[in-house]
Amino acid sequence: MSKAAQTHFNAAQDVSKFPSSPRNPGRPIGPSPPPTYPASAPSPVVTALARPTLSESRHPSVTARARRAPSSSKYPPLRIDTSTREYVLDVVLPVEIKPEMVTLSTLKGDKLRIVADAWHLEKDCHFEWEIVFAPGDVDMTSIRAKFGEEGHLVVRAGRRACKV
């Protein structure tokens, strides 16, 4: 560690050495301590949106999810790796699904929806997941996706730092 980095690190550890800010009494002037991340937050809840029954829809269409979605046993598993800085969601999609056939959308309540749909196929070609994160745990604007070789989709969601 360089001398400057070590000085910054030591100063950040003991902020009581700095005088208080005139505008914010009690808040020290000088470098702020590094952000801390929650040690353990509840794991996100993943739901594979199952195939609805035909009776649930009034007018089944040609692209009805009930007809095109596979049974839950044929869904590719969505794996979640958790660290103090981010969540990494990892799924290997069928080779028929290309990058332009995948949609990610953020929803109210810290939810992320992943839809993969091979629109040119008739069956076992529509996959949908909804991931619910703990309230305020994820910076929803930091979500990034990368579509790799052979249908490997990796989604990264940065976690928010705790305010100390």
Image (spheres, rainbow, N blue to C red):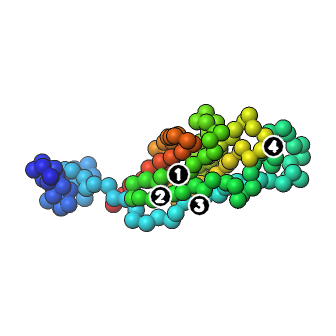
Q: Kindly tell me whether residue 109 is visible in this rendering.
A: no
Mark 1 → mark 3, Cα distance in angstroms: 14 Å
Q: Nearer the viewer, residue 164 or 145?
A: 145
| Amino acid at dot 2 | Asp
Q: Is residue 62 above or below residue 82?
A: above
* Residue carrying label 4: 64
- In the rendered structure, which amino acid carries the disc numbered 1? Asp
Pick the quarter of the image with the C terminus: bottom left
* Disc on the earlier residue, 4 or 3: 3
Mark 4 residue element: loop
Circle 3 is placed at which residue position?
45
User: Are the residues flagged by discs 2 and 1 in contact, CB closer than 8 Å?
Assistant: yes
Q: CA distance from mark 2 to mark 1?
A: 8 Å
Q: Which mark is drawn over residue 81?
A: 2
The alpha-carbon separation of the residues under discs 4 and 3 comes to 25 Å
Q: What element does badge 3 sit on?
A: strand
Residue under numbered circle 1 = 90
Q: CA distance from mark 2 to mark 3?
A: 13 Å
Residue 117 percent coordinates (x, y): 68, 40
Marked residue nearer the N-terminal end (2 or 1): 2
Which numbered disc, 2 or 4, marks the residue that appears first in the sequence? Answer: 4
* In the image: residue 123, left or right of residue 146: right
**Closer to the N terminus: mark 4 or mark 1?**
4
Tell me, yes or no, if residue 122 can be seen here.
yes
Residue at image position (81%, 43%) is 64
Residue 16 at x, y percent in the picture: 18, 61
Mark whose residue sits in front, 4 or 3: 4
